[in-house]
Each structure stands twice: as C-alpha cells, then as structure tokens.
Amino acid sequence: KQWYQRRVRGTALYTYLVDLLNGALELNSAEIESLESQLEENNSVIAGYEDLLVERQTLLDQCTEEFSTCKGEFEKANIHITELTDIVTGLTDKVTEITDKVTEITDKVTEI
C-alpha cells in the first residue's frame, strides 16, 4: 500500500512537473514570438534609417560637388579680379605720369 501511495504521489508530482514545464515552454514560445515581432519592427525601422542615410549621403555628395564647382568659379573670379587690379594699377600709374607731364608743361607755360 505504501508503495502504491508513493507511486501515486510520484506520478502526480511528475504530472505536475510536466505541466509546469509545458506551461514554461508555452510562455517561452510566446515570448520568442513577441521578440521576433519586435525584431521585425526594429529591422523595418533600421531599413528606414538606412534609406534616409543613403538620401543624406546623396545630398552630401551633391553639395560637395556644387561646393567644388563654386570654389573653382570663385578661384577664376579671383584671378580675373587680380588681373583687373593690375590693369587699374597700370592705368593709375599712366594717369599719374600724364598728370606729372601736364604739371611740367603747365609750369613751363607759366614761366613763359
């Protein structure tokens, strides 16, 4: 009789433990499904950020190209400004020479 009671209790304990493990497995399965769902959402968000990153990189490349073009144009303009400045300086020197000669001639005319 004791042996039978131990067997019944052992079977009940075994059944309880199996039920407990099955419940834990079900909870783990539900948690895994939830985590997989979150992972899919996160991957979707990451893909969106990657698309934005590609767009931003494209814009940055375009801006860099535009800046390079503008820089080249600015350098050309600076060269032209330097050339014009040299021409104006040369003309100013000529005007000064002419003014000096006119002054000399005026002085000579005044002496006469």
Image (tube, rainbow, N blue to C red):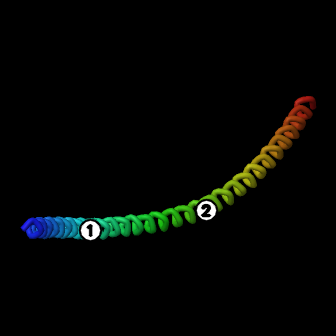
Tell me if mark 2 has few (under 14), some (14-19) or many (20+) residues whose alpha carbon lies within 10 angstroms of its own: few
Q: Please state if 19 lies on the left or on the right of 91 as rendered.
A: left
Label number found at residue 44? none
Residue drawn at (92%, 34%) of the image: 108
Q: Position of residue 102 (x, y in %)?
A: 85, 39
Who is closer to the viewer here, 95 or 37?
37
Tell me the quarter of the image containing the N terminus.
bottom left
Who is closer to the viewer here, 5 or 11?
5
Q: Please state if 106 lies on the left or on the right of 60 as rendered.
A: right
Q: Position of residue 76 (x, y in %)?
A: 68, 60
Residue 83 visible in the shown view: yes
Query: Eyeballing the image, is 99 above or below 23?
Result: above
Tell me if mark 1 has few (under 14), some (14-19) or many (20+) residues whose alpha carbon lies within 10 angstroms of its own: few
Mark whose residue sits in front, 2 or 1? 1
Q: Position of residue 99 (x, y in %)?
A: 82, 39
Q: SS for tag 1?
A: helix
Residue drawn at (52%, 66%) of the image: 62
Q: SS for tag 2?
A: helix
Task: Identify the residue under disc 2.
Answer: 68
Query: Eyeballing the image, is 107 above or below 77?
Result: above
Q: The residue under label 1 is which amino acid type?
A: Ile
In the rendered image, which quarter is residue 100 located in?
A: top right
Task: Identify the residue under disc 1.
Answer: 32
Q: Of the residues under marks 2 and 1, which one precedes in the sequence?
A: 1
Q: The residue under label 2 is which amino acid type?
A: Ser
